Amino acid sequence: MPSATEQVVEQAQALLSSGQAEVVLGYQRAPGFVLARPLFARTPEQAERLMLDPGCVADLSSYALQLPQKAAAVVKGCDVRSFVGLIQEKQIKPEGLTFIGWNCPGVVSERKVRQRLGDRADTLTAVRREGDQMIFTLADGEQSLPAADVLADRCFICKVQQPQGVQVVVGEPITPITSDDPLGSELQRLHAASPDERRAFWAEHFERCIRCYACREVCPACCCRECIIDCTRPVWVPRAPTEQDNFLFQQIRMLHVPGYGRCTDCGECERVCPVNIPLRLLTRTLHDDIVRLYNYRHGLDSEAPVPMTVYDTADSEAHMGRPKK
Amino acid sequence: MAGSVSAPEKQSEAAQQEPVQIVAFFCNWCTYAAADLAGSSRLEQPAVVRVVRLPCSGRIRPELVLAAFHRGADGVLVSGCHPGDCHYAQGNYFARRRLAMLSDLLTATGIDRRRVRVEWCSAAEALKVAQVIREMAEDVREWKREHQGAQRH
Amino acid sequence: MKAYQLRAEDLAKLILRAAAEREVWAPVRRNDLTLFERITDPAQIDWEADNVRVPLRGLFLPVQEALFTFRKEGAEVTLAAPQDEPTLAGRLIIGARLCDAAALEYLDRAFGDPLADAPYRRRRERDLIVAVTCEKERPYCFCEVASEVLSRPRGADWLLTRVEDRLLVEVLSEKGERLAQSFSDLLSEADSQLLEAARAIRVAIAGRISNNARFSPEGLPARLMAAWDSPVWQSESERCLGCGICTFLCPSCQCFDICDRAGILGGERYRCYDTCQFASFTKMASGENPRPTQSERLRNRVLHKFAYSNERFGATACVGCGRCVYLCPVGIDIREVVEMATKEAVPVE
């Protein structure tokens, strides 16, 4: 049985040789810190470097708007949702786009891996899942860790291990590792807290924000040609990373993406933040409100309208009127 | 003529109240007209509101509300036509969704609910406008008193 | 310059005494992250972390600062300096690494005469920096190869190296010597054995680090200039997200933007970090952009660090701290980029 890596290489080479794709966007092994890097393979030789394993964390739909009409992308079930979200919004066309879907065994959290493996994580060359163990190949041998200790938080609540709406599938389906949502208790705690406590919580985190905009650049939904944050006439948000201005920046981004129902909870924003701001606590809060209020999940149906572009005459008015004591 | 002229005692009492600044986004056809009617009817209301007139509640970018708070507004009031009665047919339906999510965002990021209020006020509802403004001034003052000096926006 | 020794157990005493008369800043761990923070108790210091996330330069050229405020009253406009930083005595910054300190020495040149940057210089003149020698290198460290950081310690006032239960205190500046005098009861002259042992540690690390660089620093400026048209810039920047992580967290980056935050009656002029990695960095009012794609922008960053800086200030800007390498979300490694770009390029005589 060929491995997922062997299958993805074979599929990619076939697509490139036949001309069905001018570029195959996938993952290659990286010698170190991110466990896998994006690869734009344009020839069968370049496609040799493609691989798939639980280190393939990134959501490659960040590059969706850069792809030519005839392209292929290697996607996990969560990633294809981000692509489909862009199709829903007519930012990309589905014609000519081939998805190579991967039956994902769950991907790791790079931060958790570093915490568990320490220095040795720097020598990682491969990672695979066997049952409920994640096996890391390091310079000094293999190290097995319980998968539940190193899985990315969102994998525990994943409903799309077998990607939907893809033309090609690689990898064997494998029983997902599920558990209660790791964010659950923290989300509840924030929900139950007073407004002042919430404000103070976010102030402590947004104080550290340096406005590198990695969260915005990586987000598949953030694709505006001119972002409101960069607008100088008028200046909506001052550039300086003071807590007050950072708060406004984050509020606007949170409004535009999860607030408007355009977030698929890919978690990339939190992963790339260099100062460890727990952004998913905000994205999830709003993402879950969209599910609750409008029964909508982004990126599952390429024909579905995005929630802010439609309405129901019976929409919730819970936010209206005098706030109850 | 409806309403009452405020007595001198009430006026000085009002003057001693903590100043608060409420930015109001009103749609031109309904709420703004109602506010106008409230004014010409001499309905009593605290002078705490600065009105921004927009053609429709659907024109309200939630970022305007966020910007108002960022620049120091104590409270923000938004009001438009009742659903089904929008001058532009659908604007307020879109506004309702957008403002629902704005409201959730504000709550999630710790902006006290007393500081933001969304209403529907038709052109005839001058009394409602005045009442909403009175209530909001009360609510925002209460919030402000609790946060003497320690206010972050 | 002189060298002293301090018993390791006396370091806490020294810090407490310093904290009584000035602000002391040191690496503190919070939210799985180590950053420079003001401390009052030596127990707060995180000695385990490799390096602070936001580099030492953030204390001298902060992510944002107010330059002045302005207020309009009638026809009059009043300018006011921002509230001065609290310390009369300079800050004592302890726990800096030599890479970050060397970057500061580079920035001293960039912010020096004839375009002296007053806020930066004020802090540099006033504050004291106690650097510490790393106990081990990481795979992304290439400080020695980039800028001879270990063999030419610079940019700080003291350098501490731990040898068993003693600390070697190498004084690197006049200010450092005055500081040493103020702790003369805790310091004694270093013996040659301690000096030898400390230097051996640095030499050993430097030796191992030379394996980490992947490129040779020999004639690098010329070799990089010769690689101007290399296809590597395009291929390596294709996955670049165009965020500011590499530059904002670089210890030697210096670019800033100046903006106003103002209302009708007044406001403030501030400066904040800017980055050549943003598309709008070189965009002009006409819409013209001389660095239109990420390819030109990546080339600019690499050449600035390894070529232009040498030409303008006589020093390599990159100090090999490795932050851009391990923080890049898409794994763009500046060492690899330099290696690939210069592999085939032959400098034109």
Image: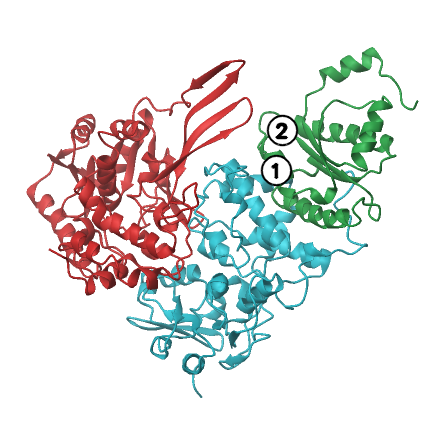
Please state the horizontal and vertical placement of residue A296, each as a whole percent of the image. Answer: 68, 61
> Is residue A144 found left or right of B86 in the rendered image?
left
> Residue at label 2?
B147
Between A45 and A118, which is closer to the camera in this rendering?
A: A45
Colouring chosen for the image of the structure: by chain
C172 vs C297: above or below: above
Q: Can residue A83 be seen in this snapshot?
A: yes
Report crowding for label 1: few under 14, some 14 to 19, many 20 or more residues within 10 A (C-alpha).
Answer: some
In the displayed orientation, state which residue is furthest to the front. Answer: C286
Q: Three-letter amino acid code at disc 2?
A: His
Chain letter for the residue marked with disc 1 in the picture: A
> Residue at label 1?
A196
The chain assigned the colour red in the figure is: C
Q: Colour of chain A?
A: cyan
Report crowding for label 2: few under 14, some 14 to 19, many 20 or more residues within 10 A (C-alpha).
Answer: few
In the displayed orientation, state which residue is furthest to the bottom. Answer: A1
Q: Colour of chain B?
A: green
Q: Three-letter amino acid code at disc 1?
A: Asp
At 88% from the left and 34% from the top, the residue drawn is: B124
Chain letter for the residue marked with disc 2 in the picture: B
Between A123 and C315, which is closer to the camera in this rendering?
A: C315
